[in-house]
Image: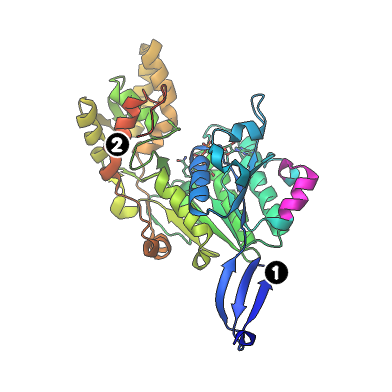
Amino acid sequence: MYDKFSVVKTIRHSSWQVRDAGTRVVFRVDSEELIFVTGATGFLGTQLIRGLLKRQPRAKLALLIRDRSGQLGRQRADVIVPAGERTRVEVCSGDVARPDCGLDATVYRRLRATTTRLIHSAATVRFDHSLDEARRINVEGTRHVLEFAAGMRELKNLAYVGTAYVAGERSNLVLESELDVGQSYRNTYEQTKAEAEALVRSYLGSLPGVILRPSIIVGDSQTGATSSFKMMYWPLKIYARRLWRTLPGFPDAVLDIVPVDFVARSVVHLLFEEAAFGSTVHLCAGPRGSATIKQIARRAAEYFQVDEPRYVDPKLFFAVVRPLLFMALWGRKRRVLRDGRAYRDYFTMRVQFDTSNAERLLGPAGICPPPVLDYLDRLFQYCVASDWGRKPVSAQ
Ligand SMILES: NC(=O)c1ccc[n+]([C@@H]2O[C@H](COP(=O)([O-])OP(=O)(O)OC[C@H]3O[C@@H](n4cnc5c(N)ncnc54)[C@H](OP(=O)(O)O)[C@@H]3O)[C@@H](O)[C@H]2O)c1
């Protein structure tokens, strides 16, 4: 009976296949996976690593981590990787902005020969970097990762973490297939992530890969936990603390936010999803799940027991009101006025992200983003419990 079957080790996909006499594959066993990940120390990266270790119990991970603040990459990884999992994780010091990702030549060659999947999540997410600095990390960094991936003989898939905000200042429905439609960008982050995505797209003809575009990532939908209090947290904090109530924006502006657990789970799932190859996926709440500024502000007002915001036309505010206030205010309020400028675009956005491809690929696995209003209170709770990131919160 056994002579009707043959066992084949596929070279490119490093898996064992059992084929019948007609060479039809009847059974396939993936041998050990080696997953190379950049950005592991980040807000999203930390959750990605935990998700990979949990959902891929046989996989080994290679993490590219920068040596920083007097700590080696290996030492920095200790806070991300649970003690019981360290034998499955190799940490490589590197820097994506440097040629060959700054990896030691021997490590580079070995990983090039053995990596089966790759997640590129490293980026600078600062809005205030110069174009040169943002390009060095986001565009050239991505180029170095792609060149590395192009030499990987065993590579089955590459997941590139982009952002839905490559849509820049668009104010209509953005399709997952679209990238450059002549839009302008609000900052060097959006621009360089768009340039990097264009680069990834140019490789996707020859490399198996998928582009993943989260919108604004916030804390965990179940616990509210977050390690990042940037993005929407800063305006929320000053509002909750009654430091500012005037909102230069539109009550009907749309805020598309997604919890970090949804994004991490989606990235891990799509890394193994062949149907996603070559496509772009919006990891967004989408038109059905996102909320307006007014809805979010109302919930925050109820939760923090503050008055609802006063809405002011943003053009009038930035042209007239703000310069006058800047002269009249000092101390804390002046600092709020100064720092708040970086967040002005949150309150005027009317862009929506189509999620058809995401629903097609993630729906069958039961992965979908919870509507923003369903978990908002848990985010608020965590902000209070952690004093906006100042004190640790014990895991529930
Ligand atoms: N947060 C969001 O709301 C959001 C939304 C949409 C998309 N994204 C995308 O998601 C990804 C992760 O974002 P995040 O929020 O997790 O950002 P983050 O917390 O700032 O993490 C960024 C990660 O990239 C690493 N990194 C930066 N420059 C590097 C370099 N030159 N070489 C090697 N590693 C480098 C950082 O390492 P260090 O620890 O050494 O700095 C860190 O691990 C990014 O690609 C971002 O564009 C984020």
In percent of width and height, residue 172 lies at: 37, 54
Q: Residue at x 38, y 65 (%)?
A: 364
Say what secondary structure mark 1 lies in: loop
| Residue toward you, 187 or 6 | 6
Instruction: Tell me how the rendering is colored.
Output: rainbow
Determine which of the numbered discs, if any, sits on residue 378 in the image: 2
Q: Which mark is residue 11?
A: 1
For the residues labelled 1 and 2, say whether their Cβ atoms are less than 8 Å apart: no
As drawn, 275 above or below 309: below
Question: Looking at the figure, which quarter contains the C terminus?
Answer: top left
Tell which residue pokes out farthest to the front in this image.
Answer: 1
Circle 2 crowding by C-alpha within 10 Å: few under 14, some 14–19, many from 20: some
Q: Does residue 130 appear in this view?
A: no
Asked if 109 appears above or below 66 in the picture, the reply is below
Q: Is residue 2 above or below residue 261?
A: below
Q: Is residue 311 above or below residue 35?
A: above
Q: Secondary structure at mark 2?
A: helix
**For the stretch drawn in magenta, what is the main secondary structure?**
helix
Residue 201 lies, in percent from the top left, at 59, 59
What residue lies at 43% left-to-right and 64% top-to-bottom? 361
For residue 181, the mark is: none
Q: Quadrant of residue 174?
A: bottom left
Residue kind at label 1, given as amino acid type: Ile
Query: Hey, what amino acid is under mark 2?
Result: Arg
Placement of the N terminus among the 4 image quadrants: bottom right
Segment tinted magenta in the rendering: 101-112
Image position of 383 (left or right of 4): left
373 within the magenta span: no
**Residue 300: x, y in percent?**
25, 32
Figure quarter occupied by ligand 1: top right
Select label 1 or label 2 by which is in front. Answer: 1
